[in-house]
Image (cartoon, helix red, strand yellow):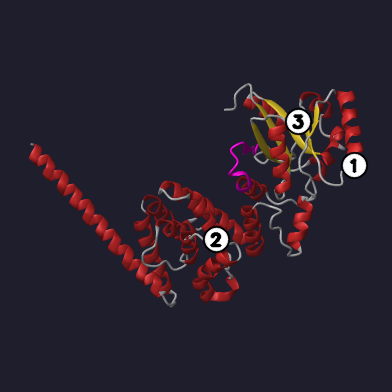
Amino acid sequence: MISSKARIGVFGGSFDPVHIGHLLVAETALEQLALSQVLFMPTNIQPFKQDAKVTPADDRVRMLRMAIKNNPFFEISTIETDRAGVSYTIDSLYALRERTGSEIAFILGADMLKTISQWSRAPELLSEFPLAIGVRPGEDMEKVRAYADELRTQYGTAITPLDNIPINISSTELRARMKNGESVRYLVPDSVRIYLDVRRKVGERRFSHTKRVMDLAADMAGRFGEDPEKAALAALLHDYEKNPKAGTENDLVHGAMAAEAAKDIFAVSDENVLNAIRWHTTGRAGMSNLELIVFLADTVEPGRSYESIGRLRDHCLEDLERGAHQVLVELKKYLEKKGLQVSSHTEAAIADLKNRLQQQQSQQKGARRAGLFGRRNND
């Protein structure tokens, strides 16, 4: 909980997608206004853009989390995306002030200052909350200052122009560049660029599966002592080369193809992450925990609905090796029933996991015997 003396900045907008201009404005506000925190508040539906096509809130929030993950003073408020319907800033700011017990400064771009007097309950908004104004190149600062003076005179609004580095970039321009196949490298954080590229390439339906795999892989990584960020990255890229129209051959090789793309296109160099991508389709002997996690997350993610999914998911969440062994045995049976060839890597993975489980059982029996022998001696 933020202390009652804290002053936080609330930065509202669509963030579709978040870019470096947003981050620079937030960082400048943090320093210039001596804020304890900046909350990024993505909108659900903007009152003046109700017919606009906007990237789903879930994707915009995920990209924001990726963009700010290394800044301890940046957080996200989903107060607007958690509600259905149109987002009214005044309602959100009141709710955040009550929730945090803090003074709130509202951060917005100079272009929005021109229309803010037309917003819902504008007199309340402009008299209750101080404004911090970020600028972009080409902004007519004389007009901006004139708007600010009018608001100060009419509503007593406290307005602080920010000395941010002006970046001539907008989310609209970024979406246009991506639509035209142009690069957005260095215009958005790398993690956001990868997310956008994967989403564009695999399509929304396949990407829904990817997001479920990311969430489950990150959760499993936390359970089993692995790095959730590495698990999520491998899961994000695991189906990058998936092509449902290419048949069973692509089913087997798209993992290896995606690992090469991760290395060549996205500069992923962590071999454990690359192997988790590479072997998620067939498995292999000697799989690491991260490899097992991504393989299993892909197999038992919540969108899967085959007959044994509930039982397998429970086993996977209890024991990686046991869960993977059971999944691979069932995969082999399924392929054989369909008259399809079982990969030699899958056969090797089954044998290896069976051996690992037997060793695990032997160690457990040995430990129990040692404990029993020790108790008898003590008696």
Residue 192, x across and y down, in percent:
64, 53
Q: Is residue 66 left or right of residue 378?
A: right
Q: Which residues are magenta?
A: 66-79
Is 74 situated left or right of 49 in this image? left
Foreground disc of the pair 1, 3: 1
* 151 drawn magenta: no
In front here: 195 or 68?
A: 68
Depth check, front residue: 315 or 156: 156
The CA span between labels 2 and 1 is: 43 Å
Give the alpha-carbon distance from disc 1 to disc 3, as whole Å: 27 Å
Residue wearing tag 1: 140
Which residue: 37% across, 53% down? 315
Q: Amino acid at mark 3?
A: Ile
Give the Cα distance between marks 2 and 3. 43 Å
Chain-order first, disc 2 or disc 3: 3
Kind of residue at badge 1: Asp
Q: Which residue is mark 2?
A: 268
